[in-house]
Each structure stands twice: as structure tokens, then as C-alpha cells.
């Protein structure tokens, strides 16, 4: 998938992070000490599916079913997971 | 499709600002007496008329409806109130991400367990130094051992460990050791917050301000530490604006993301807004927060950039810092609508240069520190400040 993200990697939210839908913002947010991230559109859909159980391939499949008309979806999803892992919002749960 | 928006530092929030961060300064009473405390110097006038539990709960509900999400419970020392458990539990039910900001005094096994049940998300503990001497000197208390015990308690209860260390001349050269200590006790986040000069710290500025050399060294040590620990521990280094060339975007803009409710219920766009002349701040006792945030004259006053004058008005950088801090502009120059004197383009920039010079003056630096306590606050309210701050000559 990419150098850092393999299809059988499993990710979940980092310890102490909270993910929730915010009605007032109309989007998902990630909450942690000292900050918050608004996850606009697709970003929220990806993070929502990183449940510490499904692997990346399964997450991509799910998103393809949910958003059949999105072009080049796999590359986008992998790029986002890479970014989120880089920022330590998510972490590898097991392999 | 990847579309992230960081809301913690400097992100643009869009056209309809929301008070994403609510700070509840639930009491100004405090067992510590920190020399750098940013609480108002007249806090003693707000210790007898604190909001009730019901009033806090009403404020939490109204703010949540407006979109508030991060809740800080601070003070003073919030744990001096015995209803923090109730406030925390209500915040949990409302879906806030709640942070208790404490000196550690008053945190017990029983209370921390109750906070956990109520859904408190994290605890931010203030630490001061690796030495007992400096910790006890700067806080004018004997709290060194207690802080270590509280840190261990926070860890045991599986809270993210967030340490806040206010940096000043007395501890800046210990930054390396302070970071090592933080690592040892398992901190997840460390905020090295260089003193900002408001309230008590402004009174003590000449005694607290480090030199530029000390600051550069501290930054280098911090960066080296960061490289070594990586993502394991996040280290924030809050730069002191006096040594910067451009001002900070104070509170991320007036009435853009922050809303503060003080112990007596005043609603402010920033901690020290009450020093500004000609503004009346609404109070949660008789005003609805929706009106306060969206319509009150106080919140409209410096929102956006319509209020600006030159050099800010036509400055190409005005979006970046919104002219800096209104309180700092007023406190130093006497004009709340002028550019923050920190800015090198400000006609008042010499005031900052003078403050830096003053901090190098051994006579001024050796003045006794005015510790934050009721007696000193009372004196300042009664206009007996002369004997306390005889040489505080930077004021207009
Ligand atoms: S800075 Fe010190 S004195 Fe001020 S509120 Fe915090 S603990 Fe109390
Ligand atoms: S002139 Fe005003 S807007 Fe421009 S950088 Fe300085 S403070 Fe900011």
C-alpha cells in the first residue's frame, strides 16, 4: 500500500484520544489534551473505521462500498492513515 | 478526501466563530502564591461572590449548545470548591472533553476516583522546578513533595499526564532536568510556558524575565530533548512574546474560539480582558451565553479587524496576529487599540525594549517579589500599591 502502511496493519485511536460526532460543527472531531482536530468529510469516515480490529485492507473495502463513486480512494485513504499515524492520533494495535 | 483542520493553534475557524474552548475559572481562591500568576491583581474582590453549582451547570449547558467542546476547569485552585465532582459529571454528560487544571493541592484518592467516574478526561498539573528550593520559593509554599505524589496518583488512575511548567528566570536554566523529570514520571504532554506578563507576573516582570541568551539555550535544549523522545512525549514550548519580532495571535483572536467564565460569572474573551477600559462584560447570572458570544458589545468590540488603526490597519500581516494582544497594548501603552508593543512596527515598541533592559538591571531585578496573596491583592485594590511596587515604572 505504501512504505509505512501495509494492508494487514491494524490501527485504532491512540490512547487517551476521543473521537465523536459534533452536531454544532457538522463533522467528526478528535479530542485530546491540548487540542482538537476537525475531521472534515472523508477524514472522519476513515478514522471512524479504525477500530483496532479491522485491518487497512478491510477499511478500504468498506469505504469503497460506502463511497462507490470516489476516484482513487485507496491512495487517499492510505495517505490519510499515514498522516494520522505520523501525528500519533492513531496507533498500531496488532499485526 | 483527506481533510483535516487543526483547531489548536492558529487555524482559521471560518465565518461564524464558535467558542470551542470554554475555560471555567471556578474560583480565585488558591493555596499557592505564585509570583507569575496571571490572575487579576484585584482577585480578592471576586472571592466572595462565586457562582453556585447550579449557575455553573447552566453555563456549561449554554456553552455546549453554542459548540463548546474543550472544557478547562481552572482557577485559582479549583479543588478548593467541593462541587467539582458535580461539575465534572455534568460536563461528561454534555459531551465535553474536560480538563482539570490544578496545582495538585486538594487532590485525593477519593476525589480522583470520583472524577474518573464522572468522565474527567485529563488532569493538568503545574510543576515548577526540579529543586525544592525554587518550587517553594516561586509559589511561596511548601508544595514540592506534594506535586510528586499527585503526579504518581494521576498516572495510577490512567489519566494522560499533562504537566505545565511556567518558565522564568529562576527555572529556565533547569529546563533539561525538568524535561528529564517529566520523562521519568511518565508525562505524556509537557507545556513549557514562558511567563506572559499579565496580572501578578506583570508586577514582577523585572524579577522574572529571563535573558535572550537563556531563552535561546532553553529552546535548544528542548529541541534536543524532542528529537530524542519523539512522539512518546509531546513538548510544547510557548515562546515569550517579548523576545519575538511579531506579537502572538492572542487567544487566537478576540471572540474567535475562547470563552472564559470567571469565578463570579463574568464572561470574557481572554483572562485579563477586565483590565481594558470602557468595556462592560456580561455575567452568566443574568445573560444567556448565546447572546454574550454572538451579540454582546464586549465580544463584538475587538472581533475581526474593524477596530484597528495604523500600523495594523493596512499591515499585510494583520490576519496572522490580528494586531496582537489588546490587554498587553493597553497595559503597556495605555491605548487598547494600538498595535501590541511587542511588534517591531509598533510606535510603542520601545516599551518592550525598555522592559528587557530593566530586567538586566540588577537593582530592579533584586526588588522583592510581590507574591500573589490576599493581603497583597487587598493592598493593590486599596491603592496602597506604591509600597509594593515602588519601582514599577513601565506603566504609563
Ligand atoms: S498560578 Fe499559582 S497562585 Fe495563581 S492560580 Fe495557579 S497555582 Fe494559584
Ligand atoms: S503592525 Fe499590527 S498587524 Fe502588523 S504585524 Fe504588527 S501588530 Fe501585527
Image (spheres, coloured by chain):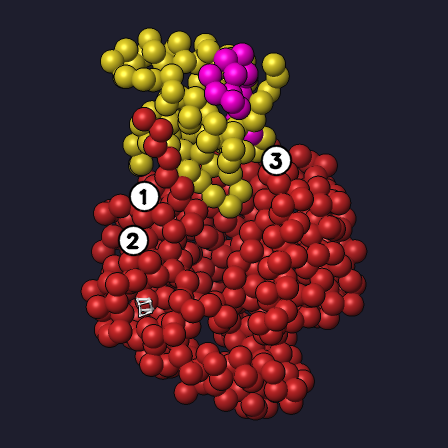
Chain colours: A yellow, B red
Task: Give the CA distance from mark 1 to mark 3.
Answer: 26 Å
Could you say which disc has been placed on residue B131 in the image?
A: none
Give the residue at x 61% y 87%: B361
Give the residue at x 53% y 24%: A4
Measured along the vertical axis of the image, is residue B325 above or below residue A32? below
Range of magenta residues: A1-14
Which of the pair B278/B366 is nearer the observer? Answer: B366
Measured along the vertical axis of the image, is residue B292 above or below residue B111? below
Q: Looking at the figure, which quarter contains the N terminus of chain B?
A: top left
Measured along the vertical axis of the image, is residue B29 above or below residue B370? above
Which of the pair B39/B290 is nearer the observer? Answer: B39
- Tag 2 near tag 1, CB within 8 Å: yes
Could you say which disc has been placed on residue B293 in the image?
A: 2
SS for dot 2: helix
Mark 3 near ligand 1 (CB under 8 Å)?
Answer: no
Q: In the visual, does B171 lie left or right of B250?
A: right
Residue for badge 3: B116
Could you say which disc has been placed on residue B66 in the image?
A: 1
At which x and y percent is residue A40? 33, 31
- Tag 2 near tag 3, CB within 8 Å: no
**Structural crowding at the residue carrying mark 1, measured as other residues with C-alpha within 10 Å and reported as few (<14), some (14–19) or many (≥20):** some
Disc 2 and disc 1 on one polypeptide chain: yes
Q: Which residue sits furthest front?
A: A3
Amino acid at each position: 500500500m505504501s512504505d509505512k502502511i501495509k494492508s494487514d496493519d491494524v490501527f485504532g485511536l491512540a490512547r487517551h484520544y476521543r473521537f465523536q460526532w459534533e452536531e454544532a460543527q457538522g463533522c467528526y472531531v478528535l479530542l485530546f489534551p491540548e487540542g482538537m482536530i476537525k475531521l472534515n468529510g472523508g477524514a472522519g469516515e476513515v478514522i471512524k473505521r479504525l477500530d483496532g480490529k479491522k485491518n487497512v485492507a478491510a477499511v478500504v473495502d468498506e469505504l469503497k462500498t460506502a463511497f462507490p463513486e470516489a476516484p482513487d480512494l485507496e491512495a487517499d485513504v492510505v495517505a490519510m492513515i499515514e498522516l494520522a499515524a505520523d501525528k500519533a492520533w492513531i496507533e498500531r494495535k496488532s499485526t | 478526501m483527506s481533510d483535516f483542520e487543526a483547531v489548536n493553534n492558529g487555524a482559521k475557524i471560518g465565518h461564524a466563530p464558535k467558542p470551542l474552548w470554554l475555560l471555567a475559572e471556578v474560583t480565585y481562591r488558591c493555596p499557592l502564591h505564585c509570583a507569575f500568576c496571571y490572575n487579576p491583581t484585584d482577585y480578592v474582590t471576586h472571592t466572595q461572590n462565586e457562582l453556585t453549582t447550579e449557575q455553573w451547570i447552566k453555563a456549561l449547558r449554554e456553552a455546549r449548545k453554542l459548540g463548546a467542546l474543550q472544557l478547562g476547569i481552572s482557577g485559582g485552585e479549583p479543588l478548593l470548591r467541593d462541587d467539582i465532582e458535580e461539575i465534572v459529571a455534568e460536563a461528561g454528560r454534555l459531551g465535553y472533553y474536560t480538563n482539570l487544571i490544578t496545582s495538585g493541592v486538594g487532590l485525593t484518592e477519593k476525589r480522583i476516583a470520583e472524577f474518573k467516574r464522572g468522565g474527567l478526561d485529563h488532569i493538568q498539573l503545574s510543576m515548577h522546578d526540579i529543586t525544592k528550593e525554587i518550587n517553594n520559593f516561586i509559589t511561596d509554599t511548601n508544595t514540592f513533595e506534594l506535586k510528586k505524589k499527585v503526579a504518581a496518583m494521576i498516572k495510577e488512575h490512567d489519566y494522560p499526564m499533562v504537566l505545565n511548567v511556567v518558565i522564568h528566570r529562576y527555572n529556565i536554566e533547569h529546563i533539561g532536568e525538568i524535561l528529564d523529570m517529566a520523562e521519568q514520571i511518565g508525562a505524556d504532554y509537557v507545556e513549557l510556558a514562558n511567563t506572559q506578563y499579565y496580572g501578578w507576573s506583570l508586577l514582577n516582570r523585572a524579577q522574572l524575565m529571563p535573558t535572550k541568551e537563556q531563552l535561546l539555550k532553553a529552546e535548544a535544549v528542548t529541541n534536543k530533548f524532542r528529537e530524542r523522545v519523539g512522539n512518546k512525549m509531546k513538548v510544547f514550548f510557548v515562546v515569550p512574546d517579548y523576545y519575538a519580532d511579531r506579537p502572538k495571535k492572542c487567544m487566537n483572536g478576540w471572540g474567535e474560539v475562547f470563552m472564559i467564565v470567571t469565578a463570579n460569572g463574568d464572561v470574557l474573551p481572554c483572562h485579563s480582558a477586565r483590565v481594558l477600559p470602557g468595556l462592560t462584560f456580561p455575567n452568566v447570572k443574568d445573560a444567556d451565553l448565546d447572546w454574550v458570544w454572538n451579540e454582546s458589545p464586549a465580544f463584538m468590540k475587538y472581533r475581526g479587524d474593524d477596530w484597528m488603526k495604523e500600523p495594523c490597519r493596512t499591515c499585510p500581516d494583520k490576519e496572522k496576529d490580528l494586531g496582537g494582544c489588546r490587554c498587553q497594548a493597553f497595559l503597556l501603552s495605555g491605548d487598547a487599540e494600538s498595535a501590541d508593543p511587542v511588534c517591531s512596527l509598533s510606535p510603542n515598541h520601545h516599551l518592550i525594549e525598555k522592559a528587557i533592559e530593566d530586567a538586566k538591571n540588577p537593582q530592579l531585578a533584586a526588588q522583592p517579589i510581590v507574591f500573589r496573596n490576599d493581603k497583597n491583592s487587598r493592598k493593590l485594590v486599596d491603592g496602597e500599591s506604591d509600597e509594593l511596587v515602588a519601582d514599577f515604572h513601565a506603566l504609563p
